[in-house]
Image (cartoon, rainbow, N blue to C red):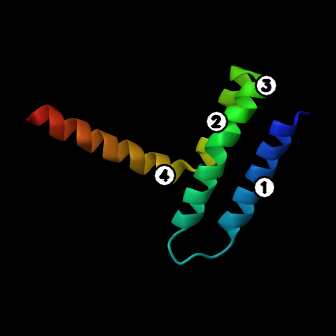
C-alpha cells in the first residue's frame, strides 16, 4: 500500500472521529479543515495510484463531507437560475 493511500485512510479515520465529537457550529469548521487537507491529499493519491483510485477516494471523501457538497450544489443552482433569469 502506498503512502498516499495510508494517509487517505488516516484522513477517513480522523473524519469519523471528528464527526463523533460534539460541536457548537454543526462541525463546519472541522469540515473546512478536512477539505483543506483532503484536496491536496486527493491529488497525491491520484498522482501515485492513478485516476481510478483517485475517483474512489473522491467518492469516499464526498460521502463523508456530503453536507458541504449539498450546500455547494444548492448555491450553484441558485446562482445559475438568478443569472439565467436576467
Q: Mark 4: few, some, or many residues within 10 Å (few <14, many ≥20)?
A: some
Q: Position of residue 61 (x, y in %)?
A: 64, 43
Q: Nearer the viewer, mark 1 or mark 3?
A: 3
Q: Mark 3: few, some, or many residues within 10 Å (few <14, many ≥20)?
A: some
Mark 4 secondary-structure assignment: helix
In this rendering, would 80 be left or right of 9? Answer: left
Residue pointed to by mark 3: 49
* Residue at 63% across, 76% down: 22
* Residue at 15% across, 32% down: 84
Up-down: is 22 above or below 28? below
Mark 3 secondary-structure assignment: helix
Q: Mark 1: few, some, or many residues within 10 Å (few <14, many ≥20)?
A: few
Residue pointed to by mark 4: 68
| Dot placed on the residue nearer the N-terminal end, 2 or 1 | 1
Q: Position of residue 8 (x, y in %)?
A: 77, 43
Q: Position of residue 77 (x, y in %)?
A: 29, 39
Per the model, the C-alpha gap separating discs 1 and 3 is 20 Å
Q: Position of residue 45 (x, y in %)?
A: 74, 33
Amino acid at each position: 500500500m502506498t503512502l498516499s493511500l495510508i494517509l487517505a485512510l488516516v484522513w477517513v479515520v480522523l473524519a469519523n472521529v471528528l464527526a463523533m465529537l460534539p460541536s457548537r457550529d454543526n462541525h463546519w469548521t472541522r469540515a473546512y479543515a478536512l477539505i483543506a487537507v483532503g484536496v491536496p491529499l486527493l491529488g497525491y493519491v491520484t498522482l501515485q495510484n492513478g485516476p481510478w483510485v483517485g475517483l474512489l477516494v473522491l467518492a469516499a471523501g464526498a460521502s463523508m463531507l456530503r453536507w458541504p457538497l449539498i450546500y455547494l450544489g444548492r448555491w450553484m443552482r441558485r446562482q445559475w437560475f438568478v443569472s439565467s433569469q436576467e
